[in-house]
Image (spheres, helix red, strand yellow):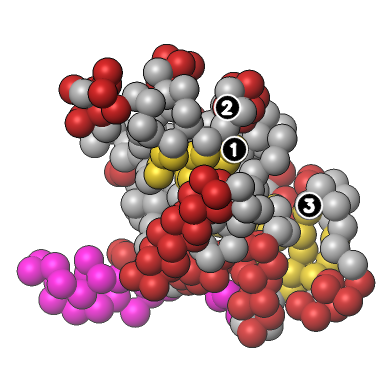
Amino acid sequence: MEEYVENQKSLSKKIRAIYMWYHKPVINEELLQSLPNLKIVASSGVGIDHLDLNLLSSYSVKVSNTPFVVSTDTADLGMALMLASSRRIVEGYQIAVSPDTEYFPADWLGAEVSGATLGIVGMGTIGYKVAKRAKAFEMKILYHNRNQRNKEEESAVGAIYCKKIDDLLQQSDFVLLSVNLTPQTHKLIGKRELELMKPTATLINISRGLVVDQDALVEALQTKVIKAAALDVTYPEPLPRHHPLLKLKNVVITPHIGSATKKTRRLMMENMMESIQAGLTGLPIPNEVLL
């Protein structure tokens, strides 16, 4: 991108594709106007909330993402966050390595995952893979989704559909968010929703930070409206170093690593290159994002 900015005049008509990693480069109208032969933007990951699809379409630019290759690792991380929070893994590590530790307290306890109730908000590819893993933990699985899954898919994981998100929030020991960020899901979980959750419940977010009202979450954690949170996503990323979420013992935060394994990242890159090649040769684009 720096090379393009320095040599815009000679490069602008040559660039026909943008390979977009971690939301960079930022694509706005100014950039699109400067690239008259742009055909496709290949974006890494599932979310496309960083792209203005209508704007890109107005310039006849196609868009692709990599939704399927990230689902397994992201589901794994959702379970890892649930276990880390419930069994207080981070706190336990700190006790184990602290130079001040002289004995391990016998009353230092976590919460059970096996047999608990998991509520999944967003039963797409990732959410469904979380449900498969949760079944192995003998969890009761509730889910809320725009559309109910068919009976065969539900029975395969033992999932029960909640048409109203409120019903799921009130019953779940763990609430896991796995939705795309859209105008409808922006701050989907706010003060009202957090107050519907059990005081013993944990909120897990593997979707996007803005799906949760972060100020309301901080207050809920500080006042014990809910027990804990485990977050792979926040807003912004990273959080300012003085942010209250970073100081709470009942919060586990990871640096947006849902798809961060060597194999998956390589597959993402291969998918992006396949989409670019297809877009430039007029072939059907794998994982094309449609309006």
Residue 15 found in image quarter: top left
Q: Nearer the viewer, residue 114 or 288?
A: 288
Q: Amino acid at mark 3?
A: Asn
Q: Nearer the viewer, residue 224 or 250?
A: 250
Does the stretch in magenta take in 153?
A: no
Q: Nearer the viewer, residue 101 or 206?
A: 206
Secondary structure under tag 3 reads loop
Percent coordinates x, y for residue 234 in the rendering: 43, 41
Q: Which residue is mark 3?
A: 145
Secondary structure under tag 1 reads strand
Does the stretch in magenta take in 113?
A: yes
Question: Considering only order in the chain, which callout, 1 or 3, is on the residue closer to the N terminus?
Answer: 1
Kindly report which numbered mark, 3 or 1, lies closer to the viewer in this rendering.
1
Q: Which residue is mark 2?
A: 56
What mark, if any, has residue 62 been given in the picture?
A: 1
Percent coordinates x, y for residue 252 in the rendering: 39, 56
Q: Going 34% across and 79% down the picture, which residue do you hit? A: 106
Measured in 3D between alpha carbons, the distance from the residue under mark 3 to the one under mark 1, in whole angstroms, is 28 Å
Q: Is residue 177 visible?
A: no
Q: Is residue 33 visible?
A: yes
Q: Going 20% across and 31% down the picture, which residue do you hit? A: 3
Q: Amino acid at mark 1?
A: Lys
What mark, if any, has residue 174 been given in the picture?
A: none
- For the magenta stretch, what is the residue range? 92-117
Q: Are marks 1 and 2 in contact (CB under 8 Å)?
A: yes
Percent coordinates x, y for residue 156 in the rendering: 80, 80
